[in-house]
Image (cartoon, rainbow, N blue to C red):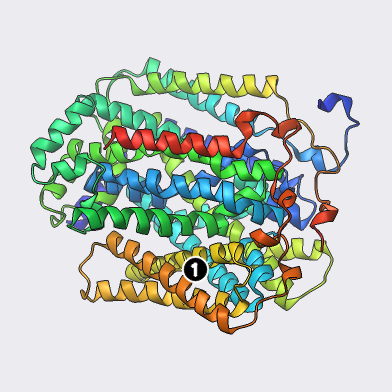
Amino acid sequence: MQVLGAASLRLNAGPIDYVLIAVYFVLVLGIGALARRSVSSSLDFFLSGRSLPAWVTGLAFISANLGAVEIFGMTANGAQYGVPTVHYYWIGAIPAMVFLGLVMMPFYYGSKVRSVPEFMLRRFGKFAHLVNAISFALAQVLIAGVNLYALASVVNLLLGWPLWVSIIIAAVIVLAYTTLGGMRAAVYNEVMQFFVIVAMLVPLTLVGLKNVGGWSGLKDKINHINPGTAAAQLHSWPGTNITGISNATLSVLGIIFGLGFVLSFGYWTTNFAEVQRALSARSMSAARRTPLIGSYPKTFIVLVIFIPGMLAAVLSPELAAYKASGGTLKNGVTYNNAIELLIRDLLPNGMLGVAIAGLVAAFMAGMAANVSSFNTVFTYDIWETYVVKNKPDAYYLRVGRLITLIGCLVAILTAFIAGNFNNLMDYLQTLFSFFNAPLFATFILGMFWKRMTPLAGGIGLIMGTVSAVTVDALNRAHVLNLSNQGASFLGAIAAFVVDVVLSVLISYVSRPRPEAELTGLVWSLTPRDALRQAEVGQDAGWYRKPVVLGTGVLVLAAALSIVFW
Amino acid sequence: MSAETQAKPAGRTAGLFDLRLIIALLFTVFGLVVTITGVVAKAKDVSASGQNVGVNVNLWTGIPMLVLAALFVLWAVLRPVRLPPPTEVGTPQPDQQQ
């Protein structure tokens, strides 16, 4: 049964498809080789010398996240739950990205820190810094392995290549361009990948819609096939199907506070793999505009992600049967195969090659983002801060290149382990997601409350994470009865509240840092000019004002939310 | 404002190759290959798995790809990369230092 299922997803790739894939990878490596010439210091290598224009960092910002996990995961959500998938974007990502650009970026970029953990070090000292730096570095290198394994299993499924071949080829390509060209190569490839992914998703959506009779045809089909759940699938609110909370009001609150406020704000504003893209921008204005420019394509891209998911669940007989059985049928497909099924059924040779290149590129860009943020945090925050201090810059550039190699080797190892212990890897990934919500609470308190102490920063972080883990464990032990996603929303809320309460209590009984050390890190102690950007030359013009851009995208997301209400 | 009026800074900026032209190159190749495949294919509306999808996907994706490539070239020609002023990179502002 399993073998049959696997074979049914095999794509009919022809010579033209392989030519297109090869062209793509020649360019990927070419970018690495070209970018090498611009690397002459560690800052060039880790943050591309803070020189990139905002449109490049903005697209890289969303592309670093538009990896395979998102493409497969969110099309799967679309196939299973339908329209409520949009909440991950319009309630989740967009407000968080606006908040990052408008409120938090002035502190990150203005304080000239080179990483998010380094901000932690300067604001809260070594305890919180070590907790943050080590957990982040470890998470990134292991997730790089998970990405690598996911890539290999998709290539295996679609093209029939053995797992180890794809793991090694992909790791070598990522290693080549990230060690050669550093951050600039990673970012340029992410931007290129963005356009290839769009070139895959848009035709898939349009052809799929044409075949089902347009949006109204899709709605009719879903009403006909899933009469019981059609209403929940075709309206974004109250989203009871994604939260697993049957009470409509509580479900809405769970989405807004859990997914929207805590989970997404935590992820987008403190995850260094994302923030690093903005720190590579060439000016304060460009850094603030990075998440804002990224938020516009992010608002629209969900349309070509959840709609293909819904299409796959009606157009593909296998997936439709799986869905009709409530996810119990063992016919070799799951919701995660939604995009692969659409590609197989709808694309001719030629576009098939573009689609495969796009998928593989998405995995590799995800892995490159993990690797390039790992090497930065390892070199600056662990090696330079605690192990070998005060060496010339060229030394840290060498360390950066070497640790990139080691990181890729660990990722390969992780990928092979992941193949044997699938559930363990799932759980690890969930575990790392627990770090984000308390981080956000700690950062936001720390940025706006000068009284908050180093001890409060460290303990708040640890106990916040513990509470998120506890909620997850309770749900797994069936003490709570929530869907997986509902549990992660609740866990995030718990982590946030525990972190804030503990941080406040501990701050009143421990000693704060002297105010002189907190200039540029805390709102009330920072001269307003240090948080403002120059608005001349390439940063001039009303349409480049962060507030205008941020307001614009919020209005856009609100308008789209009303359309899909 | 314009790069031409400035002395050409050495070293650092030599690597500022233009990403827009690389994207244009990629989509020119993709667009040409896919469009030609769409024109010459025997069964034009049929997917790789043999399903009739009612539209020549290669042709109607290839043409927009070529348009996208042309737009990137146009942008790169109209707004060439301006070299950053030498003081902007790598030197922290004095007022940021403690």
Q: Nearer the viewer, residue A153 or B73?
A: B73
Residue A67 position within the rendered picture, expressed as x and y whole percent measured from the top left: 45, 49
Find numbered disc 1 in the image and state the secondary structure of the residue it sits on: helix
Residue A144 position within the rendered picture, expressed as x and y whole percent measured from the top left: 50, 60
Q: Which residue is rendered at x = 55% and y = 44% of the image?
A: A291
Left or right of A387? Residue A265 is left
Q: Nearer the viewer, residue A490 or A206?
A: A490
In the rendered view, tell whether residue A547 sits above or below residue A273: above
Q: Which residue is the extreme one toward the bottom?
A: A509
Quadrant in which the C terminus of chain A is drawn: top left
Left or right of A505? Residue A250 is left
Task: Give the residue pinned by disc 1.
Answer: A413
**Total marks in image:** 1
Q: Nearer the viewer, residue A197 or A61?
A: A61
The three-letter code of the residue at mark 1 reads Leu
Q: Residues within 10 Å of mark 1 (few under 14, many from 20)?
A: some
Q: Which residue is the extreme one toward the top?
A: B39
Left or right of A344? Residue B40 is right
Residue A123 position within the rendered picture, expressed as x and y whole percent measured from the top left: 66, 69
Left or right of A213? Residue A444 is right
Residue A329 placement: quadrant: bottom left
Quadrant in which the N terminus of chain A is drawn: bottom left
Residue B52 appears in view: no
Residue A410 placement: quadrant: bottom right
Residue A360 position within the rendered picture, expressed as x and y whole percent measured from the top left: 45, 46
Residue A536 appears in view: yes
Q: Nearer the viewer, residue A53 or A489?
A: A489
Chain label for disc 1: A
In the rendered view, tell whether residue A277 sits above or below residue A546: below
Residue A557 placement: quadrant: top left
